[in-house]
Image (cartoon, rainbow, N blue to C red):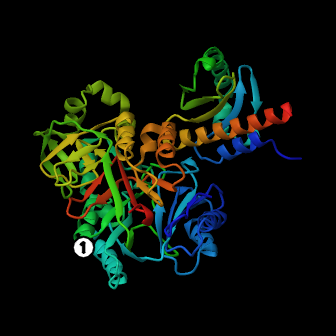
Amino acid sequence: MTEDPILEVLNDLLNYDEILACMVARQNMISVMPDQSRFNPKVMEIWDIIKRAMDDMFIIIREYSQAGLGEMEFRLQDYEVLFYVFPDTENALVAIIPALSNKGLIEIEMENARQDILKIMKEKEEILVA
Amino acid sequence: MVMAGNTKIEASLGFTRKWNAREAGREVAKSAINGLNQPPSFFLLFTSIHYKDLGGFDELLNGVWDVLPIGTPLIGGTSAGFINNYGCFGRGATALAVAYPNMDVGIGIGRRTKISPKSASSKCANMIKKELKKTKYDQKFLIDMISGGKVPNLPVRGLLNYVKSPILGNIAVRLFPIFQYMGFLFGREEELLDCLSSKMREYYIIGGTSIDEGNFLVNYQFFKDKVYTDAIVALGVAIDTPIFMTRTSGLGKHEKKFRVTKTRCKRRVMARIENKKAKDFYFKEILGLSEDQINKLGSNLYYKFAYFFPFSLDKKGGYSTGLAGFFGNNVAIAHSINDYISVNFVNGKDLFDSIFTTFNDKADNTRFPFMLIFSSSHQLLIRNKIFRTKEILDKKLGDTPYLVIQPMIENTYVPNENPYVGVYGFNTLSVLKEDSI
């Protein structure tokens, strides 16, 4: 069976030391998530509270993505959660990183991942239309 | 594949995102030379630091030489990231291969740059001069990569770029010569370039300092099929077509100068500015922070300020540099200080303006077979907004193969002008196509 290409992009992101967990999600729903065994165990310890905070952030994303909201982030305890919104949708690429990360590198690779996923989504849409 | 081959000068970009070092080496070389109709006259290789843990740089070079014709002059090194026609990347490898019959190429290397920069620079320059001694071409340029500064990472203590205690800070500064001898601390780029430019006066020089992803722990330089950590490597070219070079700064300058009244460690550490403790003066009087704010930042102090408030030095070329660390009341910077410093405030607008200045609308940007750019660590400052840089370059340069390398510090020299070592510049190098002259 061929692996979901979006999952491949997410698995690629998890190769970076400072990306502790990542997924494509919307409010109350995780659309694509890599094998959780690849997530950093420390993140999993506080996963419930992170997940609740994420869901609250998705309310804002749903409200403002049509208005051009591109990125959001919040800091919780020793972690930061980055949201890279897919334009005009309620979905976002989400990554959890340590609070003092090298964002120069991470944000570039998050942007590359967002563009890759957008391309995959577009291709999927074209197949469905055809 | 991006290539420009309509004229006799051919240039082609290599690029890979493969994780395995050997495979990445093969792919970056293959994609570059596939774009040429003749063997490359030289090959520039730049990679992110990640291959250190993904097979190693020896394996990456093995992969390159699996594909690259034997004897091709090759230099390069690690950079914080790169932009090319394919995109903006913080991980991967890229290469620029150029082929042209009316061109002579020589490469050089000098080692132990942190201990004896003048000797390293001289050796490197002499090797190139020897190889290009009999050239009949009078247009000359040189591309260099220098081993950057490294922060010692001590067991238990961790990174040695912030020491709060004044006593321990003073002790750390006293130990600097030992760390420097061990290959850590300052890159000594200004000494290397001053020497290199004095020996290669007729060459246009462009280059930078190799770096990891921004942690300043380790960096690598490539020379032929070998990997080094303490070297200056350079590639000299003599060619029959005019050279194009620009250097612009993205630094927003603070006009006020401050007198450095006490220095340590060969003038690389400021102990007192305007007769006040250097750290206090920097934070309280220049940046306007309160004691409470400084204390709240704690060990984050270094990373909050290192990239954003670089210093300008009162040297001939107006060198600029970033913070190297805080040690008690001392402030260390990457270059040696004369009597005065000024502090710059960096912002994205100034950085983008420097790009527009280079590629203004009136210039004919189709006359270049390639464009090589050194622009220090923009991504650390503007993060994913760096994709805007690519948009501008795509618009201005079209299909011309271009490569932006992001070193720690960049260096340039134009014949009959002052050499420059600095940060947040936008420096370009190319030659003119024969049919555009």
Q: Position of residue B108 (x, y in %)?
A: 38, 76
Q: Position of residue B82 (x, y in %)?
A: 50, 51
To which quarter of the image does residue B189 belong?
bottom left
Q: Is residue A17 visible?
A: yes
Point 60% across, 71% down: residue:
B37
Using a 10 Å C-alpha cutoff, classify the residue at mark 1 as few (fewer than 14 neighbours), some (14 to 19) or many (20 or more).
some
Vertical comparison of A54 with B404: above or below: above
Q: Which residue is mark 1?
A: B199
Q: Say which quadrant the C terminus of chain B sits in.
A: bottom left
Q: B398 and B406: which one is in front?
A: B398
Q: Helix, strand, or loop for circle 1?
A: helix
Q: Label 1 lies in what chain?
A: B
Vertical comparison of A63 with A73: above or below: above
Point 33% across, 71% down: residue:
B139
Q: Callout 1, which amino acid?
A: Lys
Q: Position of residue B385 (x, y in %)?
A: 49, 36
Q: Is residue B218 visible?
A: no
Q: Position of residue B397 (x, y in %)?
A: 48, 49
To which quarter of the image does residue B123 belong?
bottom left
Q: Say which quadrant the N terminus of chain B sits in.
A: bottom right
Point 47% across, 55% down: residue:
B79
Say whether residue A33 is left or right of residue B93: right
Point 39% across, 52% down: residue:
B408
